[in-house]
Image: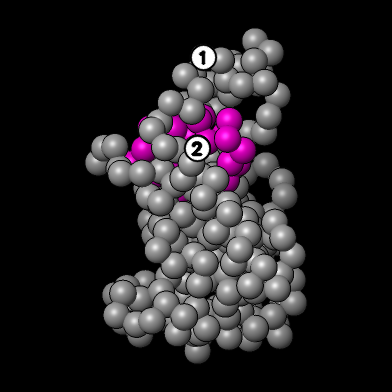
Amino acid sequence: MTLTFLTSCSTSGLAERYAAALQNIAEAEQEAKVDAGSTKLIVVSKTHPADLVLELLQLGATNFGENRDQEAGPKAASVNESIAQARANQQWNGPDAKWHFIGQLQSNKVKSVLRYASSIHSLDRPSLLKALIKELANQPATKPLPVFIELNLTGQPERGGILPENLIEFATQVLEQNTLKLEGVMGVAGLDVEPAFDFDRIRKSSEALQTLAPEAKFISAGMSNDYQIAIRHGATHVRIGTSITGKREYSV
């Protein structure tokens, strides 16, 4: 069933762009010789309204990425409310939206983000780890929260992230927490280097991490301009925004 309270897929070209991304992912998977459909597509919905998320749900998307709590919190609540209403009216029997927090997370926003986020891709410093541990200890017992350790590939401390040479030490601290589930690493290719170079560094960091934690095998890397390259270098989760959603509709 569709969400009949929406104009089905009304955003111009959205269905075509979403289908093209799926096709590009499939081609990259084939080139990388990985299982078809093994790459998780996270549609970056930041600066777009809840209605666009609902339209994407109708197209088959289930995973959405946000990077600012002050925008993501109300949007997630609106989407969830719309889905709940549609279910009550027997207008929707599809999946719920899953929210991935992909931006730098301020420690004082942890409690708010945990209300809706199904995973955090940007665990980038000890102070954030401490804040997560503290807040999760105050919440009802549930499944461990999936997290990715964000890598700093620039070598510049002000950019945030864990330096590759410090990954194992930090990962050890994460693995000691039974309220967290370490999924793997996250990284962003630099603007001043060939994407393949940085994606290869991310892959090597992932391989090093797996010597400590074989189950932490996932790689969150690749965005609109380079996700096919990322998949060919081992990315398992790609974060695609404008090439699917189109031009940003508003700023916050």
Task: Quadrant for residue 2, please give it.
Answer: top right
Residue at the left extreme, as displayed: 251
Mark 2 residue element = helix
Counting residues from the start of the chain, the first of labels 1 and 2 encountered is 1
**Quick check: can you spot residue 73?**
no
Reply above or below: 151 against 145: below
x and y, in percent, of residue 17 in the image: 46, 45
Reply above or below: 6 against 41: above
Front disc: 1 or 2: 2
Three-letter code for the amino acid on which mark 2 is drawn: Ala
**Quick check: can you spot residue 215?**
yes
Question: Image quadrant for the N terminus?
Answer: top right
Left or right, 251 with reference to 53 = left
Query: What residue is rendered at 68% in x and 29% in y?
Result: 94
Distance, label 1 to label 2, CA atoms, is 18 Å
x and y, in percent, of residue 200 in the image: 52, 83
Question: Image quadrant for the C terminus?
Answer: top left
Q: Which residue is mark 1?
A: 5
x and y, in percent, of residue 238 in the image: 53, 60
Residue at the top extreme, as displayed: 89
Query: What residue is rendered at 37% in x and 72% in y?
Result: 160
Left or right, 211 with reference to 115 = right
> Which region of the structure is painted magenta?
44-63
Q: Which residue is mark 2?
A: 15
Query: What residue is rendered at 62% in x and 56% in y?
Result: 40
Q: Is residue 52 covered in magenta?
A: yes
Reply above or below: 11 against 64: above
Tally the marks: 2
